[in-house]
Amino acid sequence: EEASNQNDLTAKEYWDQRQEALVFRTAAECASDSEWAAKIADKLVFVDDSPKRMLEFGCNPGHSSLALLHYRDFEANGVDFNKHDVRFQESITRNGKRLGQVFIADVRKFHTEERFDLVFSCGFVEHFADFPHLIGLHAAPVKKGGYVLVVVPNFKKLQWLYHAVFDAADLAQHNLEVMNVGLIADILRKQGLEIVTSGHAGYLRFWNYSAEGGVLRRNFMRVTSKIARMVAAFVVRAG
């Protein structure tokens, strides 16, 4: 296992704690919580019908890959630094999806001669201070004519206030500078990639990692999140 370096905003223990309570999820359940997946799936146009392969950076527990696999057929491959975590493999196989290989490596040191039709990460690059380097690495293993996808949350403005009040410890594990679609697009252009689509792909929703506090605080979080999702859905559908 790789030790964290000075550019990491998180440590291995952070991910162990976040994932230890996770339960098995179906691809449909993962897709329902990932509005971006449906919007992106239609953008992935290939010139032939050969079997396609994708590679996810920071792949455990596999929920992001499953969100895409709900809409499109790929062989799922991943890169993760935790050699003891097999949630990705279990998530893919138990959902009846095609499983390829899991490479055990720090993404910054990862190298393969293999090439993939889609290289992506979701909720990954914002946990690093050197995010431009991390984003740039997505371009190395992608096939000619393939796609790179970088998905990050948006913790700015109202979201920042919510997390600062109710989930400050987890907010500190995120680099807000990378939460800028224009910046991500510019970094990928410098890698020689053409931008197919760039923008906000999800609904406004409040969520938190920490549920510390009394019952009143936790109930307030749940009610606030529910109202935000209802309002966001209404705005999106009405527009």
Image (cartoon, rainbow, N blue to C red):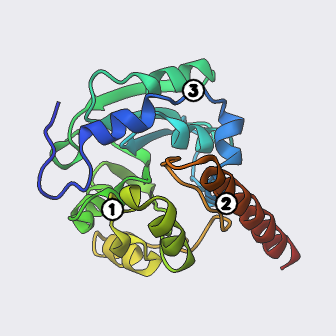
Identified at 28% across, 37% down, the residue is: 13
Give me the disc on residue 39: 2
Give me the disc on residue 172: 1
Number of other residues with Cα within 10 Å of mark 3, as a class: few under 14, some 14 to 19, many 20 or more: few
Up the image or down, 59 lies above or below 117; here it is: above
Residue 138 picture location, percent across and down: 32, 55
Up the image or down, 171 lies above or below 77; here it is: below
Q: Is residue 196 visible?
A: no
Up the image or down, 26 lies above or below 134; here it is: above
Count the numbered circles shown: 3
Number of other residues with Cα within 10 Å of mark 2, as a class: few under 14, some 14 to 19, many 20 or more: some
The earlier-in-sequence mark between 1 and 2 is: 2
Residue 33 picture location, percent across and down: 66, 48
Along the line of sight, the residue nearer the viewer: 219 or 39: 219
Of discs 3 and 1, which sits in the foreground?
A: 1
Along the line of sight, the residue nearer the viewer: 29 or 50: 29
- Mark 3–mark 2 distance (CA, rounded to whole Å): 26 Å
